[in-house]
Image (cartoon, rainbow, N blue to C red):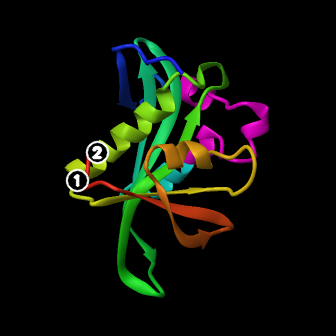
Amino acid sequence: MSTPPQGLRLSPVTPDNFDTVCALSVRPDQEHLVSPVAKSLAEAYAHGETAWPRAIVDGDEIVGFVMAFLDIAWSPAEDPHDIRSGLWRLNISAAHQSNGYGRFAVTEVAAELRRRGASQAYVTWHPGAGTPEPFYLSLGFRPTGEQTDGETVGVLDLRTP
């Protein structure tokens, strides 16, 4: 894996970059693992108070999309005080994978959650071969033992850099 260039940043999705962000697609073998960006943006609109969608930009090129969820009641029927934040979606375009963009995006989401006072970040992934589980584990996420919609729930402690 190479190191991403210095011009890497997360930027809001705007009318100017909307079409390019929506056109992002992962590899065909990953399409069943992550929703298309257009669905994520529709969810961001529907959950405007808790969604934090961003384009992953390298210089002037959009290379991916990331969306965090902020302060949601995880299982309100069981424990309405179980408030969580974390990574909702991560789509790196097929042409830009294995260049550190995903790692950068997750690191930036974790930094944003820290700035907002979160002590943990959550993520889910499908179990099995070819999933992003090794990627998330390499970033320090650990399975909680929970499942949601058939996906493994992982947590990252944000209190340590």
Image marks 1 and 2: residues in contact by CB distance under 8 Å: yes
* Magenta stretch in the rendered image: 18-40
Report the disc number at residue 116.
1
Q: Mark 1 belongs to which amino acid? A: Arg
Please provide percent x and percent y for residue 155: 44, 60
Nearer the observer, 161 or 39:
161
Q: Which image quarter: residue 59?
A: top left
Residue shown at 60% from the left, 63% from the top? 152
Please check the rendered image and state whether residue 39 is part of the magenta-colored stretch, yes or no: yes
Please provide percent x and percent y for residue 129: 75, 48
Nearer the observer, 28 or 38:
28
Residue shown at 63% from the left, 27% from the top? 23
- Judge from the rendering whether residue 39 lies leftward or rightward of residue 128; answer left or right: left
- Judge from the rendering whether residue 61 lies leftward or rightward of residue 97; answer left or right: left
Please provide percent x and percent y for residue 61: 48, 14
Residue 26 in the image: above or below residue 106: above
Residue 5 in the image: above or below residue 114: above
Q: Quadrant of the N terminus?
A: top right
Q: Mark 2 belongs to which amino acid? A: Glu
